[in-house]
Structure formats: structure tokens, C-alpha cells
Amino acid sequence: MCYIYHQISNYTKSKKNAIMKKICTLLPIVLLFACGQKAEKQETEKVVETPKQMLTYQGSEENGKHLVLISGDEEYRSEEALPQLAKILSKHHGFSCTVLFAQHPDRPGIVDANYLKNIPGLQTLESADAMILFTRFRALPDDQMKYIDTYFMSGKPVVAIRTATHAFNFDKDSTSSYVHYGNYYNGEMSEWTDGFGRLVLGEKWHTHHGHHKHQSTRGIITEESTEHPLTNGIASGEIWGSTDVYGVRLPLPGDSEPIVLGQVINRRGPFDENDVFYGMKPTDDEIAEVNDKGIPVNDTLMPIAWTKSYQLPGGEKGQAFTSTIGSSSDLLNEGVRRLLTNSVFWILDLPVPQKANVDLVGAYDPSAYGFQTDEYWLERQLKIEDLE
């Protein structure tokens, strides 16, 4: 301002005043515009933060093993179960863990269990020593399925939980290169009949053997498995979950070895839709005679945990462990947590602890299992980072 006043010093007083008045009128506008331009530039230069689309838990150098845990089911809350399992395996046992989630491509970083066609981060399988799979009827694109196929072709080990027996499914008119992974596959590749579940794990989705939401599962260790490392620290009958026993076709194929059998237990109290166990309790002890279809359920006990070797056509031989108990609410049971923890050591051919530390890590308040609408997931806006 002083400079301007000096430049017009030879003007008449009235002219100088007029010029200065005009400048004072325009100055706020000029300054406002300049500040706006600066703010806009700063806003443009801001780094847009990418939402967290997977969780990672650092293990110990002594352990050195990397686990990839893949969630993605609409019913049994794998998005809650697997982060807790990863925390147990990382904090108590030194495994490095990566947890993956189903997400809609338009809403990255937000869990959407109902969206079947996207699980970001599957490339992490390239460095995985073991996979923990808990998906249901996924129809993933080829550029994601290739990582899963490469993993199994290499014969690496897998722990499969609950709906992993029917981990994948594709429409009959699908053009996917991996349609044979689907639960209902019955095409030209005869060795893949009944899909991934049957070929790799030993069984696909078959039936509910117990009455869904009304009869719980108690785990009975087979006589042959009482000294098996998988049952270290677990007494017969300690495993319990409100999820019902799945039906399987007996005998299981190949070298399948049942480890734990599922005893079907009646609920003593009333049905409670607001209870995480639907009114069933670990103390329930009435052994069921029949299910809701009148079929005897305890004459022959169904395996709920078993081992099996696998080999994809043209691939290397690998090892699988399957547990059809293991929803997020099932993980409230110490026996279930210990069974799954033991299985990781076992499939990696590591010494299984005599009684592994499976204490829950942090707050854990799982949801009751059950299907939810698309609107539920849109409204809930469950951020992956919030599951950490």
C-alpha cells in the first residue's frame, strides 16, 4: 500500500483519495480469491488415503510362517471369526497372518458378505505357508481364482472351516475358467465332480444333519484319535457349538481320517432369536434321537473334523484339515479354538503344543449366525479396520 501511495504521490489529493478508495474496495476480493486458490491447490495436493482392505498381524521371527485367512460367507460370520483366530495365532504363537474379506468393488474397505465376486488381496497367497479358508458359494473372477488354483496346484496345506466345503459356486452358464471348483459341478472334468469340496476336502455341501438353530453340536473324539496331535489339550465332549452338525456321505473318500464326531444335542431351553446361541447352551446334555425331518441323528455320528490328502489333476500332493464347526459364535468355545489352532501346527508339520494358548485376544462379541439382507450390509458399513 505504501508503494502504491508513493507511485501516485504527484497526483492531486482528490485523485489520490479516489484511487486509494478503489484499491481498498477491491483488496478484500483479491485477497479472498488468492486464499481460495491456495486452499484449492492444497486440497488437490492432499494424498487420498486408501481404505484398509485386509488386516495384517505380525508374527515372530522364530516362527517365520505366513498364514492367509480368507473370509467370505453370508451366514456364519467368518469376517468376525477369522480376525480373532488370526490374533490368537499371531499373539500367542508367532504366526504372521493376513486376513481377507468380501467387499463390493464400489465400496472398498467395507465388508459385504453378500457380494460373491470380489475378495481383494488373494495375491498374498503367493507368500503363504498355509491357507485358512472360510468362504461360501463364492463366484470370484478369473484374475482372483488363479491365485487360489495356483496355491492348490502347488500342494500347499489348507484348513477349511464350516462352509468351506462349499467354498465356491458358479452359474451353469458361467464362462469362468474355474467353473469346476463349483459345489454342484458335474461336467466333462469327471475328477472334479462335486467341485472343490469333494476333491480337496472330501465332501461338498450335503445336508443339515442336526436341526438348524435348534440342535447344537458336541464334539466326540474318535477312539483312534485320542492320541492324535490334533486333539492335544482337548477332552472328548469339550468341543461345543450352537451350529448344527453337517451331513456327509460315509465313508469319506480316499485317505480321509475322522478326528472328531458330531453328537447332536437337543436344546433344553426355549428358542431365543436374540441370543447368540438361539437359546442353546453348552450345558445342554439331552442327546437327540431325530432331527426336524424325523431322521435318526445319533445312531451313526457324522465327522465334524477330519484330515485328508489331496491332489489336483496335474498338481502336487497336499494336506487338508476340515472342521464343519467354527462360526464366530462357535469360537467362544475353548475346545473349538484349540482344535483350529492345533490344526495349523499340524498341517505345517510343526510340533503341536500339548495345550495351546487359545485365550481370546481383545474384546470379542460375535454376532449370531444367520443370513442378512443386502440393506443390512449397506446400513452397517462395517469397516475392515474396525475388525482389527
Image (spheres, rainbow, N blue to C red):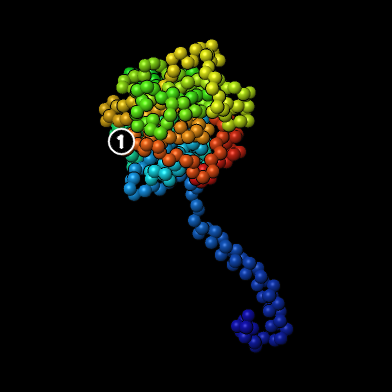
On the picture, is 225 further left or further right than 163?
Answer: left
Q: Which residue is mark 1?
A: 349
Residues packed near mark 1 inside 10 Å, few (<14), some (14 to 19) or many (20 plus): few
Rendered image quadrant of residue 172: top left
On the picture, is 25 further left or further right than 62?
Answer: right
Rendered image quadrant of residue 33: bottom right
Q: Nearer the viewer, residue 335 or 149?
A: 335
For image coordinates 70% across by 77% down, the residue present is 21
For image coordinates 43% across by 29% down, the residue present is 235
Counting labels gives 1
Q: Is residue 28 above or below residue 85?
A: below
For image coordinates 49% across by 36% down, the residue present is 81
Quarter holding the N terminus is bottom right
Residue 70 pos. (x, y %): 43, 36
Q: Nearer the viewer, residue 305 or 146?
A: 305
Q: Nearer the viewer, residue 256 or 332?
A: 332
On the picture, is 62 further left or further right than 119?
Answer: left
For image coordinates 31% across by 20% down, the residue present is 254
Residue 140 pos. (x, y %): 43, 32
For mark 1, give the secondary structure.
loop
Residue 205 pos. (x, y %): 44, 22
Residue 151 pos. (x, y %): 33, 35
Instruction: Specify the farthest residue to the bottom.
Output: 10
On the picture, is 336 further left or further right than 23?
Answer: left
Residue 320 appears in the picture as rendered:
no
Q: Is residue 100 above or below residue 249?
A: below
The amino acid on which the numbered mark 1 sits, given as a three-letter code, is Asp
Residue 279 appears in the picture as rendered:
yes
